[in-house]
Image (cartoon, grey):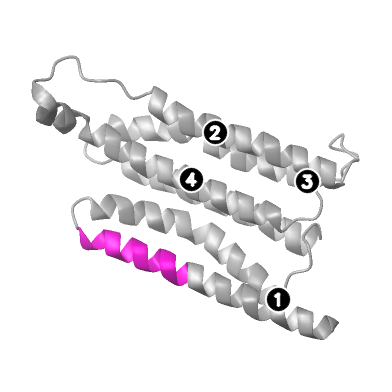
Amino acid sequence: MSDKDLGNGDTGAGHLHRLILFSDAVFAIAITLLAIEIHPPHHWHGVPDLFRQMAPHLITYAVSFGVIGIYWVSHRRIFSRLASANGVLDALNFVVLGLIGLLPLGTELLWRQEGGQAFPVYLTHVALIGFALAVLWAYAVFVGKLAKPIALPEALFVLVRVALLPGMMCALAFFSIANAWGWAVMAALTVVLARAGAWIERKYHLAAEEAAA
């Protein structure tokens, strides 16, 4: 499938900029819809009872807010590494945004779940977003050649981080509701991946600068 087939021949910076602006709007709308669907209980007696009744909604909202936030950061980091866009990237990005737009529905399923049956559906949904974003990055850097110059180890690290991190964080978040150490695992995982990414980026950028000199 070519850019011409998709009705878009502009592969310059303007195309990329408009794609980023559109994507940011979808992320913002999805994260807003999470809060719109939260309603107070019809009957409650005092603040403790209010929070007891609303706890499942608020916890699930916090997790989904975090999921969308993590994916927005991943999306921003991916697109900051791109130099241009094309029609195939548009199509892959629409898949990512379509899945993001369904997260409020997945969140509502968790609110209404019976016997924990909605959690595997929700986690699969989160994992699919990561997979779609990883496919987008793989296409952009390995197939479409749309990325700025980047070392192969750094490109592979971004691929793995985008595909796995949000799903792992989501699973740990729900698990940590009943197990406090889960929060420590999440914090440690975030720090390790952040440090590893910074080290890889610094190492290969330094090597590139030395080679250019």
- Under mark 4, the amino acid is Gly
Q: Earlier in the sequence, mark 2 or mark 3?
A: 2
- The nearer-to-camera label among 3 and 4 is 4
- The nearer-to-camera label among 4 and 1 is 1
Q: Earlier in the sequence, mark 3 or mark 4?
A: 4
Query: What is the x, y in percent for residue 79?
Result: 69, 52
Instruction: Determine which quarter of the picture holds residue 99.
Output: top right
Numbered label attached to residue 28: 2
Q: Can you say whether 105 is above or below 174 in the image? A: above
Q: Can you say whether 165 is above or below 96 in the image? A: below
**How would you rate the neighbour count of disc 4 (Cα within 10 Å): few for under 14, some for 14-19, many for 20 or more?**
some
Q: Are marks 1 and 2 in contact (CB under 8 Å)?
A: no
Q: How many angstroms separate mark 4 from mark 1 (CA)?
A: 27 Å
Q: Nearer the viewer, residue 55 or 114?
A: 55
Q: In what element is the residue under mark 4?
A: helix
- Can residue 118 be seen? no
Q: Which residues are magenta?
A: 180-193
